[in-house]
Amino acid sequence: MDLFAGFRDPAIARALLEKIRSCGRGVRFMEVCGTHTVSIFQSGLHSLLPDNIVHLTGPGCPVCVTHDAEVAAYIEAAGKDKVIIATFGDLMKVPGPGGASLKSAQAEGARVKVVYSPADALAIARENPGDTVVFIGVGFETTAPGIAATIMMAEAEGLSNFTVLSFHKLVPPALDALLSDPEMEIEAFILPGHVSAVIGANAYLPLAEKYTVPAIVTGFEPLDILQALIMMLDMLRTGRPGLANQYARVVTAEGNKKAVRLMHTVFQTSDALWRGIGLIPGSGLAFAPAYERFDAMKALGIELRDVPPLKGCRCGDVLKGKLAPNKCPLFKTVCTPAKPVGPCMVSTEGSCAAYFKYNLEA
Amino acid sequence: MCLAIPVCIESIEKGVANCRVGEGDTFIKASLLMLEGEAKIGDYLIVHAGFALRILDPKEAEEGLQILREMARAVEGQEHLADKF
């Protein structure tokens, strides 16, 4: 089985691109996963696709959708005595109120450690029994089960100094919010492969029944993406939009029930704030009562409060597909990966960072 | 945060798999705690932030590739005809 080269075969890619070019119609499609964003740019597809195939990057980068109020909350946590922050590296440079970030907090003496997995944060808690470890839980249905599992490990071990800020987001309610926006100009969706591996393709059925938009669960290799585009173009051409699963080698109809069960044991669905979109009902995960003692907000007495938005930053419009990153007045002028104004320029999965890295001017 | 490519299990110890990333010599560890079904050496995993989310289905992968090859052949066939006429 040629898993790696097979789904990247340039000869097949050229033929599929030809099929897309000869289709006779275009599509404005949105992907809602940072890994798709990176894959489409890295493989060169963004530039190779014909002009009438318009690629929009939606709210799929976990760092980018983390709300200003959540950024302010974790920076506040970092400033407290006897607190160690454990975080995915992507969050380090995200600017918060007044330009503060975890990086600047660290420079001022806050203890901030970058981890690869939430389980690494448990080790920090074990080694520092006199401190409270706060793991910043950002991410979607892919990340939340692992964090839930880690919390259950802390419970089993009796680690009382391990806590989590649960800023997780759920994908289907966000799609619902985007689709219900009357100004939305998205004709089709590429659905996130690994979120779908957890929640299952069937999780989108209620949306597919409510809206008539092609939605394809898609893998991350160039051929996966090209095939998904052909599938959505076929749906539009034949007037039969619907939900399809292109990524059957990883995604089943039901998903990973064990992971979903873990997630819903430790957390319960709650409303959540998304950058650029605002409050989306039922799109977040708060602690279930039985696990509230692991809630860093409660442990440290922190609340989400209104904070002024980042001045001049248009990340919100970028995340909704209403503004191309290179059309933002700050792009490449005052906002660069070295000195980002907004989170879409910070994260490697952010669309502004991708436009910058791949030098897209047009 | 997310690894887009599947990783191959080289060894398993205490519920944690040591996996090769792609075709290179990069290795990562992945907890198998969340997996449904039993993973074995040689299986390909989808891993996210230290946890394996799924075992890749090789039969589905092969079928998927086959469909792509056939699509490409069909396009090339048409081009061939277009050249002719």
Image (tube, rainbow, N blue to C red):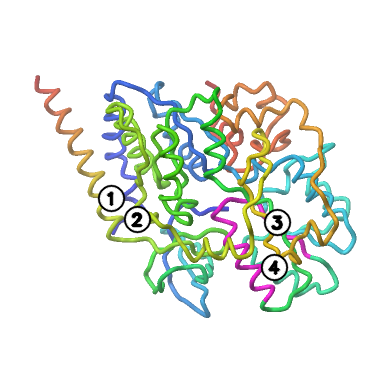
Are both tags, 4 and 2, on one chain? Answer: yes
**A32 on left or right of A115:** left
- Name the residue type under label 2: Arg
Residue A202, image x, y percentages = 41, 50
- Name the residue type under label 3: Thr
Q: Is residue A8 magenta?
A: no
**A242 on left or right of A199:** left
- Name the residue type under label 1: Gly
The one of B55 and A189 positioned closer to us in this rendering: A189
Residue A185: assigned label: none
Are both tags, 1 and 3, on one chain? Answer: no
**Residue at the outermost left position:** B84
Q: Which of marks 4 and 2 is in front?
A: 4
Residue position marked by numbered label 3 in the rendering:
A87
Separation of marks 2 and 1 at Cα, in angstroms: 8 Å
Q: Do the residues labelled 2 and 3 touch (CB within 8 Å)?
A: no
* Chain where mark 3 sits: A
**A100 on left or right of B59:** right
How dense is the environment of label 2, judged by Cα within 10 Å: few (below 14), some, or many (20 and up)?
Answer: many
Give the magenta-colored segment's residue range. A133-155
Which residue does the image show at 13% across and 23% down from the upper left?
A: B83
The one of A298 and B70 positioned closer to us in this rendering: A298
How dense is the environment of label 1, judged by Cα within 10 Å: few (below 14), some, or many (20 and up)?
Answer: some
Separation of marks 4 and 2 at Cα, in angstroms: 36 Å
Residue position marked by numbered label 4 in the rendering:
A290
How dense is the environment of label 3, judged by Cα within 10 Å: few (below 14), some, or many (20 and up)?
Answer: many
Residue position marked by numbered label 2 in the rendering:
A249
Separation of marks 4 and 3 at Cα, in angstroms: 24 Å
* Chain where mark 4 sits: A
